[in-house]
Image (spheres, grey):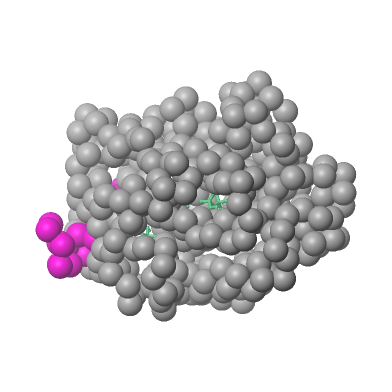
Amino acid sequence: MKIFLAGGAGYIGCHTALQLLNNGYEVVIADNFSNSCPEAVKRVEALTGKKIALYEIDVQDGAKVKEVFAQEQPDAVIHFAGLKAVGESVQQPIRYYRNNINTTLSLLEAMEATGVKKIIFSSSATVYGEENPSPYKENMPKGSCTNPYGWTKSMMEQIFQDVALTDPELSIVILRYFNPIGAHESGEIGEDPKGIPNNLMPYITQTAVGIREKLTVFGDDYDTPDGTCQRDYIHVMDLADGHVKAVEYLNREQGIDIINLGTGTPYSVLELVNAFQKVNDMKVNYVIGTRRAGDLPVCYADASKAARVLGWKAKRGLEDMCRDSWNWQRKNPQGYRK
Ligand code: NAD
Ligand code: UDP
């Protein structure tokens, strides 16, 4: 079975490509490298000893996507291709709406034109919004997002819901990711953010390696046990395995389904920093700062549906996540740009 990964050179995409190849699937990647580079794909090929058909295209370009579909004839699509920086989306909402919605429409049009019926979509816990209490369950109504990035995910979910009604043969899985961190245990692939990281773990690892002077913990006056925000951190290799299970599910079921990919266990910012220091036997320079606008105090999954319908459960713990994130950063201090 051949899987087309839109945005497959990125952080989650390349780990998923690796696990798909390891499970006997063929992989085609289309990426414009706006937030990634071909080196990640080369490393996945080296780790697996398998070839990936790689196309440098903008997935917004429907004609190009259709050409690749005609040539490669994929059986299913995984749609990772999106812009994801929350703060940047507030500064550049038009760019975010254009890129994220257009990539979705162009993939759906190419599927319709070529008879591809199966797609997995990378959504986010952010769609639960401010109204819902954690643990988040898939049957909760979506809430209000605090930024344009979140709204693009919410709107794209709606697009998939509407399209699902038009063709009973379609099989669509919306995966709502929680907070992916970690890297493949080899340290050959990992998260390689451009510029100053927005997310916690790459900020920690870049501080640990000396690229950043200190981490700022955004607020310690939340209504949580230690006052810092709690999140559901999930190892990116567990997330990748979740996609392999979701591909199996696409082959079994038709219609549309929404599934959380999280561990169900929240950890605070300070718990993560302390676990990182302990596992890697090092100090991370940090200060307590003010709250970051838009941050929710607590966000974690009810992970029971993924266990029930996919037969998937996260296997790796916080220590694995901290060790593997550091192993990647340590071996690649400048990311893929050595
Ligand atoms: P990433 O930026 O590493 O990967 C996205 C990839 O898509 C990049 O390789 C980028 O170059 C590519 N891309 C973007 N626009 C494109 C376009 N128009 N044409 C072709 N390629 C394009 O991000 P990631 O962390 O791997 O996330 C993958 C998906 O999962 C994204 O849709 C993201 O919004 C979603 N998601 C990520 C997180 C997270 O914390 N990492 C959480 C929830 C959801
Ligand atoms: N965070 C922090 N300092 C940073 C980056 C993040 O204290 O430099 C906190 C942030 O306030 C949140 C948690 O770490 O509570 C996870 O943030 P991230 O941006 O990684 O993910 P989010 O859950 O916001 O999507």
Which residue is pictured at 69% across the width and 25% down the height? 50
Image spot of residue 11 (x, y percent): 53, 45
User: Quarter of the picture for ligand 2?
Assistant: bottom left
Image spot of residue 308 (x, y percent): 41, 48
Q: Is residue 257 magenta?
A: no
Figure quadrant of residue 284: top left
Which residue is pictured at 72% across the width and 71% down the height? 166
Image spot of residue 336 (x, y percent): 56, 36
- Identify the image quadrant of the C terminus: top right
Is 97 left or right of 26, judged from the image as shown? left
Which residue is pictured at 56% across the width and 33% down the height? 19
Is 143 left or right of 108, judged from the image as shown? left
Q: Residue furthest left?
A: 225
Q: Main secondary structure of the magenta part?
A: loop
Which residue is pictured at 50% across the width and 60% down the height? 258
Name the residue nearer the viewer: 164 or 36.
164
- Identify the image quadrant of the N terminus: top right
Name the residue nearer the viewer: 203 or 115.
115
> Is residue 269 at least partly visible in the picture?
no
Is 244 left or right of 144, judged from the image as shown? right
Image height of 159 relative to 210, above or below = below
Name the residue nearer the viewer: 271 or 71.
71
Over which residues does the magenta segment extend? 209-229
Image height of 129 relative to 328, above or below = below
Name the residue nearer the viewer: 264 or 221.
264
Query: How many callouts does the rendering have?
Result: 0
Figure quadrant of residue 164: bottom right
